[in-house]
Amino acid sequence: MHASERASILAELTPAFTLLRPEEQLAPVVFCSPHSGRIYPRAFLEASRLDPHTLRKSEDCYVDELFEPVVALGAPLIAARFPRAYLDVNREPYELDPELFNGRLPDFANTQSARVIGGLGTIARVVADTEEIYRERLPIGAAFERIERLYRPFHEALAGLLEETRKRFGMAILIDCHSMPSASIGQPPGGRPHFVLGDRFGASCDAKLTRFTRDVLQAGGYEVQVNRPYAGGFITEYYGNPARGVQSLQLEINRALYLDEATLAKNKDFGRLTRTLMDLATKVFAALPVLLERRAAAE
């Protein structure tokens, strides 16, 4: 066990997440923002070779705020308080990088996934533009503390929300909310669409719901891609199981729509995008009985 890591988590990152519930849940939809956490523990900053602004490059800045108005529409929103650079809940619990830790990793750790090899495991070794985060290797106990005290409570709460929703409405739909840089590394700005929808190529979400979401956004004048370049991460894949009554759709937002990507400050269009997302949620909620009635009847 790593006492200093535990003390830091208890002092600065407890509770691990925020959960905003409507007075009454009116739609079978749960919104999740796993990468918008912006509380950077002091000990983490001291252990990093990077300044706080650089660490924030992998953060889905303000995505939780963009979606917060859905609560007034009758849907819950869960958001991590810790940053992705510290712990990534959109990974398997033990996607651990052998290059990052002192001590022997457990046999059940996944050390060979593409995400680990790229430095972006459950405990990231690099930030978005491949800069190394830490000055030196971490004790393996630090990883266990983060997983047990932050990762597990977050996923227990998310799983509970989905099960509660499924039991109440007969189905549950998870909207996993993210943001993406406006261009890939080394490419000029503007290289990516406004939105990317990921449904694991139809495995995590009914294609009718994916298409409806795409069509609403395109009708608003936005460029939308499906499953390119993001088909959905661990959360989308793990929870999306249409045969068991749970749909999961990942929604990636181009940061240029609402953010100054250099300063990480909200831009003048932040409010407009919030209204766009609320209009989308309203239309999806209204269309769900028709979109999914055939599947619900079959189940």
Image: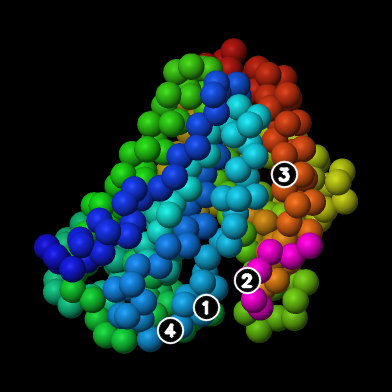
Q: Is residue 100 visible?
A: yes
Q: Say if 153 sits above or below 150 in the image.
A: above
Name which quarter of the figure residue 97 lies in. bottom left
Mark carried by residue 264: 2
Question: Where does the magenta region start and end?
Answer: 262-268
Whether residue 264 appears in magenta in the rendering, the answer is yes
Callout 1–callout 2 Cβ contact below 8 Å: yes
Amino acid type, callout 3: Leu
Earlier-in-chain disc, 1 versus 3: 1
Q: CA distance from mark 4 to mark 3?
A: 33 Å
Whether residue 143 appears in magenta in the rendering, the answer is no
Q: Which residue is mark 1?
A: 53
Q: Which residue is mark 3?
A: 277
Q: Residue at x 65, y 29 (%)?
A: 73
Q: Which residue is mark 4?
A: 50
Callout 4–callout 3 Cβ contact below 8 Å: no
